[in-house]
Amino acid sequence: MKISIRSTILAGVLLLLSTPAIAQNSEREAVDQVMQKMMRAFEAGDPNLIFEVLRRDGVVVGYSAPRGSMVTQTGEEWGSGFPGKPADDEALRKRSYEIVDVTPNAAVVKVLLDYPMWDGVDYLALSKIDGKWMIVSKSWSGQRKPSAP
């Protein structure tokens, strides 16, 4: 009887300790699904797909060296710039992402962009809004690559 009670208590404690880890994995997987959709939107140049994961009232910011100033757009403005078709050089573009941190209601993702004429890094902030993960801000930086001779 003592062994049975101890086993039950031990099993209960282990279950309670693992619940936050399971929940965090679940949230991380949900953020990963958002990022996979964003990558597909980039590949396809599809504004409809990007708006499934990007808040239209979100913000996109970055520093433009040619302008010598910050560029700020709404999510609506930035997402509407997707042309509805893949870029002509899409086969040469490389993208990857790393989920940096996930909490129950917020996440940060680092995106690396290696394009024929651009090396960039984006940091995305995601929020869980009404039970759905959405990109609420994008901070970009990068530089043009030198033209091939």
Image: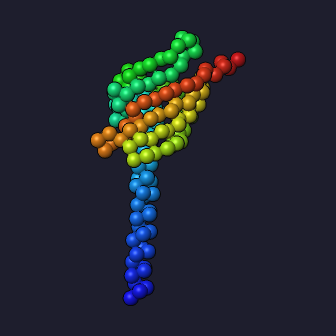
> In the image shown, does 116 or 20 lie closer to the viewer?
20
Determine the residue located farthest toward the front in the rendered image.
2
Residue 143 % position (x, y): 60, 22
Residue at horizontal 52 percent and vertical 26 percent from the top: 140
In the displayed structure image, the side of residue 58 where residue 97 appears, left or right: right
Considering every residue shown, the one lying at the far right of the view is: 149
Which of the 4 image quadrants contains residue 21?
Answer: bottom left
Query: 72 or 119, which lies in front?
Result: 72
90 or 29: which is nearer to us?
Answer: 29
For the N terminus, give its image quadrant.
Answer: bottom left
Look at the image and tell me whether residue 33 can be seen.
Answer: no
Relative to 127, is 145 on the left or the right?
A: right
Front residue of 140 and 101:
101
Image quarter in which the C terminus is found = top right
| Relative to 2, residue 23 above or below | above
Residue at image position (40%, 34%) is: 135
Residue 143 can be seen in this image: yes
Residue 63 in percent (x, y) is at: 53, 19
Q: Position of residue 124 (x, y in %)?
A: 47, 34
Taking the image as shown, residue 75 lies to the left or right of residue 92, namely left
Q: What colour scheme was applied to this rendering of the protein?
A: rainbow
Q: Position of residue 27 (x, y in %)?
A: 41, 49
Residue beneath the point at 42% across and 79% down: 7
Give the quadrant of residue 54.
Answer: top left
Query: Residue placed at 34% from the left, 27% from the top?
Result: 56
